[in-house]
Image (cartoon, rainbow, N blue to C red):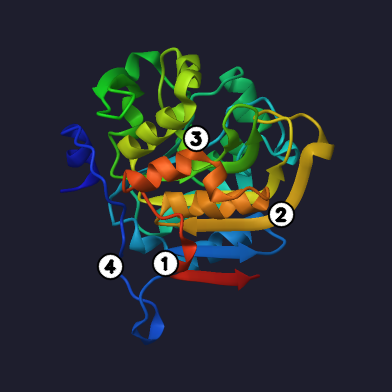
């Protein structure tokens, strides 16, 4: 069953993808998580995917691919409130090289969408690589059964479920409510409705959304991280150059690793424990196969 058929059934499974169709040289299994450091965001993203076994591990010929960055704020890339556009462009290019028929990049922004798409640099970068970059359309909202522990149903933009492959590309940053905004928090940009209601139980809401969307791949932008005054920031003094990209088949592991950039232990983030209990991934990185590279 492909992703599109699976999501049409609105079934919420509990396992993340633990293996891929390709193998690394010498018969070694593909790693679960790749950590790449260096100077160029584009080179980091490309190397991170190579370390995982290549984009063909995730995308088949003819696939429709949805890439979900954080475009939520009217901020330039230097302020680390939105995903780095060079990383998005690289992922679009790699998707097409792997055989994707169509690639879409979109987000339900907080600030005005035209300004967010433009100022973040993501619209220009993604379009240059051949992606479709639409704004969300309220007419494409559909109430769906999330079957979560807290969120039983919610309005979801169907673009994010009517796709063959889903790639989550958050940026790592501070958040005034959830402490960090990374992969699970990024799914708030795939739904509509009164999203401020999630603040009542933010950790439960994030995990319920993560369990519903279940991306094939998480690529975490930690080239610049926002250390204070998140989620929108606004001051360069709040930004730290981490010069890292993390790619993983395990979204919980990626988030666990990113917490370390902020000197936060996994047990300090309730969402991580909840996600692990739900079977969404692993907080014990020593149990995973990890590849570290520098470019």
What residue sits right under mark 4 in the picture?
21
Q: Is residue 137 left or right of residue 267?
A: left
Q: Secondary structure at mark 2?
A: strand
Q: Identify which residue is drawn at 27% across, 22% down.
A: 152
Where residue 14 appears, as percent x and y from the top left, is: 26, 46
What residue sits right under mark 1 in the picture?
287
Say which of 17 and 134 sits in front: 17
Distance between mark 1 and mark 3 Cα atoms: 25 Å
Disc nearest the viewer among 1 and 3: 1
Say which of 151 and 190 sits in front: 151
Where residue 281 appears, as percent x and y from the top left, is: 38, 52
Q: Is residue 134 visible?
A: no
Where residue 236 appears, as percent x and y from the top left, is: 82, 37
Q: Is residue 157 visible?
A: yes
Q: Is residue 214 left or right of residue 228?
A: left
Of callouts 4 and 2, the N-terminal one: 4
Distance between mark 4 and mark 2 Cα atoms: 32 Å
Of callouts 3 and 4, the N-terminal one: 4
């Amino acid at each position: 069953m492909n992703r599109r058929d699976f999501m049409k059934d609105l079934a919420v499974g509990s396992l993340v993808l633990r293996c891929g169709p390709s193998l690394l040289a010498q018969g070694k299994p593909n790693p679960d998580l790749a950590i790449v450091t260096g100077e160029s965001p584009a080179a980091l993203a490309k190397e991170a995917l190579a370390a995982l076994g290549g984009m063909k591990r995730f995308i088949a010929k003819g696939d429709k691919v949805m890439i979900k960055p954080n475009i939520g704020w009217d901020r330039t890339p230097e302020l680390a409130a939105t995903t780095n556009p060079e990383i998005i462009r690289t992922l679009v290019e790699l998707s097409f090289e792997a055989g994707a028929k169509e690639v879409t990049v979109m987000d339900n922004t907080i600030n005005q969408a035209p300004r967010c798409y433009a100022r973040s640099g993501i619209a220009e970068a993604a379009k240059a690589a051949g992606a479709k970059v639409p704004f969300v359309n309220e007419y494409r909202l559909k109430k769906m059964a999330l079957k979560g522990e807290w969120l039983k149903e919610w309005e979801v933009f169907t673009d994010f479920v009517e796709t063959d492959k889903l790639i989550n590309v958050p940026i790592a940053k501070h958040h005034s409510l959830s402490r960090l905004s990374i992969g699970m928090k990024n799914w708030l940009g795939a739904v509509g409705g009164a999203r401020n209601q999630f603040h009542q139980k933010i950790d439960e809401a994030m995990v319920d959304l993560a369990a519903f969307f279940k991306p094939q791949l998480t690529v975490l932008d930690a080239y610049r991280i926002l250390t204070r005054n998140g989620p929108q920031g606004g001051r360069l003094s709040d930004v730290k150059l981490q010069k890292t990209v993390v790619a993983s088949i395990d979204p919980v592991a990626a988030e666990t690793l990113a917490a370390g950039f902020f000197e936060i232990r996994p047990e300090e983030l309730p969402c991580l424990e909840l996600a692990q209990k739900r079977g969404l991934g692993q907080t014990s990185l020593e149990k995973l196969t990890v590849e570290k590279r520098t470019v």
